[in-house]
Image: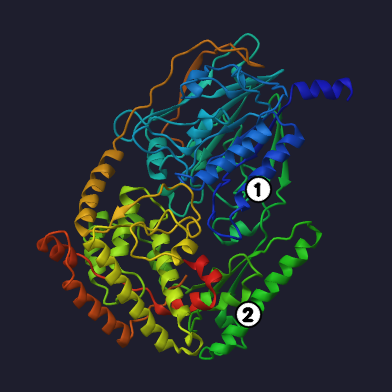
Amino acid sequence: MDDSSREEEIDTVKILVATDCHLGYMEKDEVRRHDSFQAFEEICSIAEKKQVDFVLLGGDLFHENKPSRSTLVKAIEILRRYCLNDRPVQFQVVSDQTVNFANMFGHVNYEDPHFNVGLPVFSIHGNHDDPAGVDNLSAVDILSACNLVNYFGKMDLGGSGVGQIALYPILIRKGSTSVALYGLGNIRDERLNRMFQTPHAVQWMRPEAQERCQVSDWFNILVLHQNRVKTNPKNAINEHFLPRFLDFIVWGHEHECLVDPQEVPGMGFHITQPGSSVATSLIEGESKQKHVLLLEIKGNQYRPTKIPLNSVRPFEYTEVVLKDEPDIDPNDHSSILEHLDSVVRKLIERSNQKANTESVVKLPLVRVKVDYSGFMTINPQRFGQKYVGKVANPQDILIFSKSSKKAGKEAKFDDSERLRPEELNQQNIEALVAESNLKMEVLPVSDLDVALHNFVNKDDKMAFYSCVQYNLEETRNKIARDSDAVKFEEDDIILKVGECLEERVKQRATQNKDDQPFSFNGQSLEDTRSQDIRGKSTAVGSAVSFSDDEDTTMLSASKSTAGKGRKESSQSFRSSRDASEVSKTSSRGRGRGRGRGRASNSLKQTTLDASLGFRHSQRSASIAASASVRSIAEDDENVESPSSDEDVKQDTNAIDESSVGSVFLIEYISCPKHFSSLV
């Protein structure tokens, strides 16, 4: 490297920009569970190869607001592998770090003398991993407390009315280049929209002029995570709301990859929209090639370089209008099926041709949007069964839609007139359940009581999934034990399902009578098969549940306890919504970190003026199943319970059974692996 290139390297700030990593997305899917982590690891490896100064993330690092333990562990492992090393950090943070980083440490992570951080990561939060709870904490706070991520852009909405926010930049200096990095974590779009149009509600703090650095010498970057598509102007942020002194905008939340910087007319700044690194919604915008952006800044000039992500699962998308196809009979089911089958096969072939040059070939994602106006539809799940092992999403390849004739008229109405909360709240959950005349054929109501209790009071997000899996396995095993199972017709299977449900209801009632606890967690299905279900510790474990962030709970199935649990849960929900103020740590002495800047520039305030301009098929219960359910209900009236008669009568009247179609059980018996992905 010659002297000129070395001098240019000293004065150039290199940033790798990525947004919407959505770590943990589809973590319960056997095929797609690793996609988000592989893409995030590729992003970190690109940063390492390009020797960037730091990585800038634009929100939604996690897909869930409360990520599972598995997701957190994998994220920490990746960050430790690429961020902790002896590589020197070449830039300094010269602003008041106690204001920039609202945590108990109050400084950038690479200045901690106990950590060797060679690749700093700066991140804001998105709408998926936003702060919540009494302490106003997010999943990104966990990574920040581990000293792996520099979390900024967390706002305290103070003031009256819509609130007030003040944006303080992180002032970064490398050689002769000065960068002011503004961060704005996700705020509800409607509220932020009103704030931008309210005088003095959004305050932009700018560095004051100094002897060696004028205000105009700072390269101003803003990273935010908000709606950009203006389907509803009140539910998005207009680019013209932003101040003109900004030079570069990193826009998160939008998943379509528009990584090339676009200039906003009349504003003087450019916007880049890197998009997501993993496809979370199978729409046309997500079918484009995924990229990250390498941003090189020297003085007031910048050079963008887009870098493709090669670890992203291929995604093929197309739209089909059946009325435009001349060879299809609207009343011929086979012709529709044959045409859609040929469309999907062509998409798979096209994806395989693109993947011939790759070392690791992944099953592609395929989505066909079908306009079926004037035609009959087909079952998407049955259609996808023939593509198991050929595509990554066999259960939802097809999505059916109709062209709306009233689209023009409806466009004249405001969204606020369509959805009125005072009208939506007129029906409660009991009224909605009471409207259903269908009876459940697989799940006992008592099991749903247990699952509901675990979901509400134990924060067990896998409670209903474990309940369904447990009862499906019990039903499947009972039918499989019959030596003549292969000779069963559909009506015979429905009858057997009803008999199995009756047996399980009696068993659960016996457990209630003996005051024996029942739960779905803590033991695998393989262990359950070898035990009597009437045992005192019957449970189903992690072989069914793919989540590992729930503790094993033992819960009595008595109805009176469940009622008490619901009452307590409502209180906990009320308390969890109380807002709390986030305290800021006062300034403290720093250790012997590398590249630390001690200068604290005074800031002047600039106020933004307001003048800136699966389709589900429903199936009624069979006569045999209905008769069995009625006999179950009659048996339940004769079962003794440790609770009082009045409590039993009240709880029985408050519960109405919904349906689980027996056709799904038949599909589960024939193809359990595929059905598990549907549940």
- The amino acid at mark 1 is Ala
From the image, tell me which residue sits under label 2: 341
CA distance separating discs 2 and 1: 31 Å
Quadrant including the N terminus:
top right
Circle 1 crowding by C-alpha within 10 Å: few under 14, some 14–19, many from 20: many
Measuring 52% from the left and 35% from the top, which residue is drawn there?
124
Looking at this view, name the residue that lies furthest to the left.
646
Residue 221 in percent (x, y) is at: 59, 31
Q: Which picture quadrant has residue 13?
A: top right
* One can see residue 243 in this view: no
Most foreground residue, 349 or 17: 349
Type of the residue with mark 2: Asp
Local packing at callout 2 (Cα closer than 10 Å; few below 14, some 14-19, many 20+) is some
**Residue that label 1 marks:** 39
- Relative depth, front residue between 34 and 199: 34
Foreground of the two, 33 or 353: 33
- Whole-percent x and y of residue 241? 48, 37
Q: For numbered disc 2, what is the local secondary structure?
A: helix
Q: In this view, does 278 lie above or below 267?
A: below
Q: Which residue is drawn at 38% across and 61% down?
A: 412
